[in-house]
Image (cartoon, coloured by chain):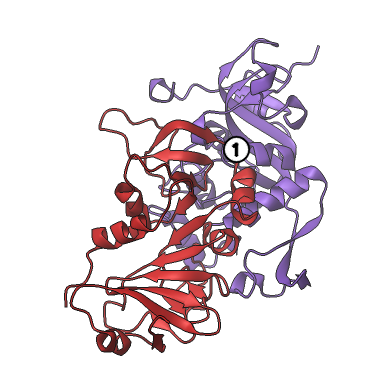
Amino acid sequence: MINKIVRTMAEAMAGIKDGSTVLIGGFGAVGQPDALIEGLIEQGAKDLVCVANNAGTGRTGLARLMELGRVRKIICSFPRSAGSVVFEELYRAGRIELEIVPQGTLAERMRAAGAGIPAFYTPTGVGTLLAQGKEVREIDGRLYVLERALKGDVALIEAWEGDRWGNLTYRESGRNFNPVMAMAAELTIAQVMHLRELGEINPDHVVTPGIFVDRVIRVDRGPEWA
Amino acid sequence: MKPFSRAEMAARVARDIPEGWYVNLGIGIPTMVADHVPAEREVILHSENGILGMGPAPPPGKVDPWLVNAGKQPVTLRPGGSFFHHADSFAMIRGGHLDLCVLGAFEVAENGDIANWATSENDTAPAVGGAMDLAAGAKRLWVVMEHTTKDGRPKLVEKCSYPLTALGAVSRVYTNLGVFDVVKGRGFVVVDMAPGVTFEALQERSGAKLHLPG
């Protein structure tokens, strides 16, 4: 019997190695797998490359992971936001590498990785600092930049419902990067608000089919999010 | 001279958006444009984080934590709205499916170049977000911004001095002093002026040559 549901955070985090590239879902706090990030902090893997839209806020979650010196590099579109204090401190001190990627290019680089496409041409960023050093090619009269796929060793994502085959649904704007990251990693771990029996999720409503998911753990975010 | 207020600038932009357009509004004055589109005119708002049919902020006590806009503020969904993931959201943007994007900017050049994400090449950790994708991808890019910086330097320029967001992307600019079309091979063409503003006064406050229509 296939059962991707794990009961403890230690099981969920098992095997994450030092030096891993970790894709972390969410857009701000929405759809961000807070419990899994805490689990990774506990688990201890270091020298990580983290891929997320933002570079953490406050002193918890991704910010805490960075503050503990466990993140070598962050790849994101919007490192500076209200409360990104830890990133600012580390960056100024030269203790973290940064790769800024336009938000749509970030999503597409992961989608491409999940879809077996090693690189693609995009009009985004042509003629800007973010295209420096990259191949530019004219196709049908327009210029495009070559961007490479971005693959994760691990994806930490948040979903709304999950079942033991790993099928997932999402809630409103909590979907954001999560389905794309689920496709793009070797090991995809999902925290879900609700566990469902196999067959209980309407197949027409499944957004991430279980083939992209390795582990599912139930995390109740509390009544505010129910 | 009576410059447009921020609300009047937003209203001036809203006036020019026809029913049926799919529109992405950036952070700042662009976000305020939504408040000035009459309820009976159906304009479908897109948000980068995976929303079509975005509605206004919820009333106090009705905040849904799962539903935020690109500025991470709570919003609502209009009947007919939908959710999708980030790659699809930016496929809509990059694939030319959005009729319009409205952004703020530091500078717009007479050839339509826009600079709106970093204030210096030495600012090594600026936040680009979706600005480059939106500027390069939407069918039309309009900019709404103050006509000059706080210390009086022009923001309509011959050539951008700040790092670029996209090349030749802007087709219209709304400022507190007027409205300008960016015409290929010509530059800034004045299509409207705030009350009491003269062409000479506008030219004086602009870093590129302005043209009258026709």
Give the position of the N terminus of chain A as an image quadrant: top right
Left or right of B112: which side holds A164? Answer: right
Quadrant position of residue B201: bottom left
- Which residue corresponds to the image point at 38% horizontal and 24% vertical from the top-left? A224
- Residue in front for this viewpoint, A14 or A191: A191
Identify the subunit bearing mark 1: A
- What residue sits 74% from the left and 19% below the top? A165
* Residue A206 position in % (x across, y down): 66, 24
User: Is residue A208 in sight in this rendering?
Assistant: yes
Return the residue nearer the eye: A15 or A204. Answer: A204
Left or right relative to A225: residue B199: left
Circle 1 — which element? helix
Asked whether the viewer can see residue A51, the reply is no
Residue A48 image position (x, y, % from top left): 65, 50
Relative to B115, residue A59 above or below: above
Q: Residue at x 42, y 22 (%)?
A: A222
Task: State the residue in front, A188 or A69.
Answer: A188
Residue A30 in the image, given as x and y percentages of width and height:
48, 37
Q: Is residue A204 shown left or right of residue B190?
A: right
Which residue carries the number 1 mark?
A40
**Is the residue marked by circle 1 packed among few (<14), some (14-19), or many (20+) residues within 10 Å?**
many
Chain A representation colour: purple
User: Residue A168's image quarter?
Assistant: top right
Give the image location of residue B155, x and y in percent.
38, 79
Q: Residue at x 83, y 46 (%)?
A: A116
Amino acid beneath label 1: Leu
The red-coloured chain is labelled B
Question: Relative to B213, does residue B74 appear above or below in the rendering?
Answer: above
